[in-house]
Amino acid sequence: MAFENMNLGRRVARRMAQLGINQVQLAEMTGISQGRISHIRLGRIKMVEAPSIFKLADALQCDPRWLATGEKQEPEEAV
């Protein structure tokens, strides 16, 4: 299963900013290459596979459904 990347990149960037992490750190946390994370953030990748969504959601401390679709409640900012 894959999810279309309409606003996924914006949600990833927002959570990264809230958590104070950069692309290199997110890549290390997820095992997803920094280049692929960059392409996701910029909307250059049109379909993102479910395993990647789950890895990103775990690292970004958010619900995978929200990350993939924008549905459900957005996570609160990190303290």
Image (tube, helix red, strand yellow):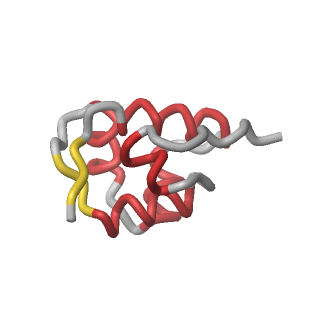
Residue 1, given in percent of the width and then of the height, sits at 21, 65
| Quadrant of the drawing holding the C terminus | top right
Nearest the eye: 24 or 77? 77
Q: Residue at image x 53%, y 54%?
A: 25
Percent x, y of residue 50: 30, 64
69 or 36: nearer the viewer: 69
**How far across and how far down the image is residue 44, in percent?**
18, 36
- In x, y percent, where is residue 46? 16, 42
Left or right: where does residue 47 sit relative to residue 37? left
Rendered residue at 44%/38% (across/down): 70
- Specify the quadrant of the image occupied by residue 45: top left
Q: Could you tell whether 3 is left or right of 69 in the image?
A: left
In this rendered view, identify the residue nearer to me: 74 or 59.
74
Q: Residue furthest right?
A: 79
**Where 30 falls versus 22 (above or below)?**
below
Residue 21 located left or right of residue 48: right
> Would residue 49 appear left or right of 54 to someone viewing this image?
left
